Amino acid sequence: MYPEVRLHIAGNWRTTSESMPILNPATGAEIGRHPVATRQDLDEALAAAERGFKVWRAVSVVDRSKILRKAANLLRERADTIAPIMTLEQGKILGESRAEIMIGADVIDWFAEEGRRVYGRTIPSRSDTIVQISAREPVGPVACFTPWNFPINQAVRKLAAALCTGCSVILKGPEDTPASCGELVRVFLDAGVPGDVLSYVLGVPSDISEYLIPSPVIRKISFTGSTPVGKKLAALAGLHMKRATMELGGHAPAIIFNDADIDSAVSILMSNKIRCAGQVCVSPTRLLVQDSVFDEFAGRFSKAIGDVKVGNGMEPDTKMGPLVAARRISAMEEFVENAKENGAEVMTGGRRIGNQGFFYAPTVLANVPTSAKIMNEEPFGPLVAINRFSDEDEAVSEANRLPYGLAAYAYTRSLDRINRLSAGIETGMLSINHHGLALPEVPFGGIKDSGYGSEGGSEALEAYLNIKFLTLKM
Ligand code: NAD
């Protein structure tokens, strides 16, 4: 069922002499290998991106839109084939894989339409013989770097936005989960995107980014991944004067006030915590609960998450799959040990499950001091810290304490408070009384160390466009 993984360069799918293993995180077994791109492959991809940009920008916006709509339909048609591939290599449950593919198709449809609305402006001039126009044009060949947690969704936001505006793309996909991302690339090519316009490469991530970013062919980069790597790539982009979008780590606070609907808060936060085994940049990680509802909330949340059935994502009754790789188990163990040493109480979980595959129990740590590692670094796994607060100022100040600023959540019935939180929480996205992030039509992105730029909504197009000012005398 697992396909052969290939690179796509200059219109051809190819392998290389060097390859690396791909593991099924539910078993730890090797399920395939991915090719490692050589310098020669990257040079060919760069040359293709340069040629492809000239071709693609000249295709009318209406025709580009039609090709993208076709890609969206193909992705939907292939959902049942691609979903098991994603579960095999990523570990997430089959239902999540399928949902990711379907929303990916919606993302393509949305950009197919929005790309037709890249308008310019006519600026009133100081003379009736002069016309002034602010026009927008595609930025040029783009290098995209996407991670393994959402093999399709992290890539589709970049590809659809770049392609709808007329850019060519070299995508460095996720080495842990390369096949489902490769199937996304295939969908665009099968729909009619010319071969030179979209290349797909895999290999040693730093070798590829350090070669592509400085290349004069590349005009923009877009990266999704950790804050430390993002800072390195942003620095390299700055050195070579390349535009950049950075979608980096988060450490989302969820503030539960004593007037909240506790049933709803427990259920929404729990299901969002176990999604993709917590390996989500907007996953709620610091639950801040007001004193008078702390015991009730912490008890019910721990019970609900402790009852979650963890197992192979291919099995229908599984609610949470494994972590993507063995290195993430070690990372969870380090967070939990460190929290315990700092005096935290383990309310549920706190251990690896079995020795086969990379399963870790959903874990609730309570009363965690801010000195603990988990209160400062993104856990990126099925761990939450639950702490109490007494007043709103204290909660907001804890929410804003970290350099991250991606997502934040709050549960309260007070409109006055919602008003204050909307202004007071330093975050790129704030979702109150529900979880409403990451739809194709709404902005998606962070501030502070969580990065810059938006990967959703009309805002996402700006990243792929240059402004050109034209003035002419009649
Ligand atoms: P990692 O930082 O080694 O890798 C994360 C992703 O970045 C991978 O897809 C990898 O291929 C890519 N990457 C790493 N170094 C790169 C480089 N020099 N150039 C280009 N791409 C590079 O970490 P990991 O162990 O795979 O994952 C753990 C951490 O990664 C988490 O703590 C989390 O912060 C981050 N992460 C974030 C997201 C997200 O959605 N923002 C997704 C996956 C991982």
Image: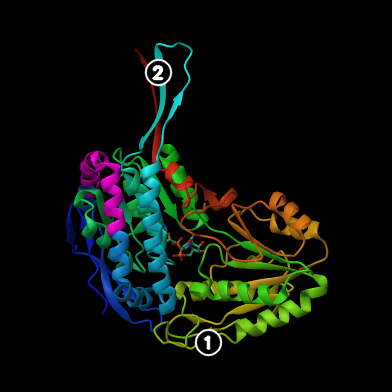
Q: Quadrant of residue 358?
A: bottom left
Residue 90 at x, y = what percent?
A: 39, 73
Q: Which mark is residue 131?
A: 2
State left or right for residue 174 relative to residue 123. left
Note whether 314 is above or below 444 in the view shown: below
Dominant secondary structure, magenta: helix
Percent across and percent down for residue 109 are 37, 56
Residue located at (49% from left, 58% from top): 226
For marks 2 and 1, the one nearer the N-term is 2
User: Does any portion of residue 344 appear in the rendered image?
Assistant: no
Left or right of 264: which side holds 467?
left
Q: Residue at x 40, y 61 (%)?
A: 106
Which amino acid, mark 2?
Val
Q: Quadrant of the N terminus?
A: bottom left
- Which three-letter amino acid code belongs to the residue tagged 1? Lys
Neighbourhood count class around disc 2 (C-alpha, 10 Å): few under 14, some 14–19, many 20 upward? some
Where disc 2 sits, the SS reads strand
Residue closest to the far front: 128
Depth-wise, is mark 2 or mark 1 nearer the camera? 2
Query: CA separation, marks 2 and 1?
Result: 66 Å
The magenta segment: 45-70
Can you tell me which quadrant of the image ligand 1 is in?
Answer: bottom left
Closer to us: 309 or 212: 309
Residue 450: horizontal and vertical position, in percent?
55, 53
Circles 2 and 1 in contact, beta carbons < 8 Å = no
Residue ID for mark 1: 309
Check the picture and name the quadrant holding the C terminus. Answer: top left
The type of colouring in the image is rainbow
Disc 1: residue Cβ within 8 A of ligand 1's nearest atom: no
Judged from the image, the secondary structure of the residue bearing numbered disc 1 is loop
Is 263 within the magenta? no
Q: Is residue 53 left or right of residue 461?
A: left
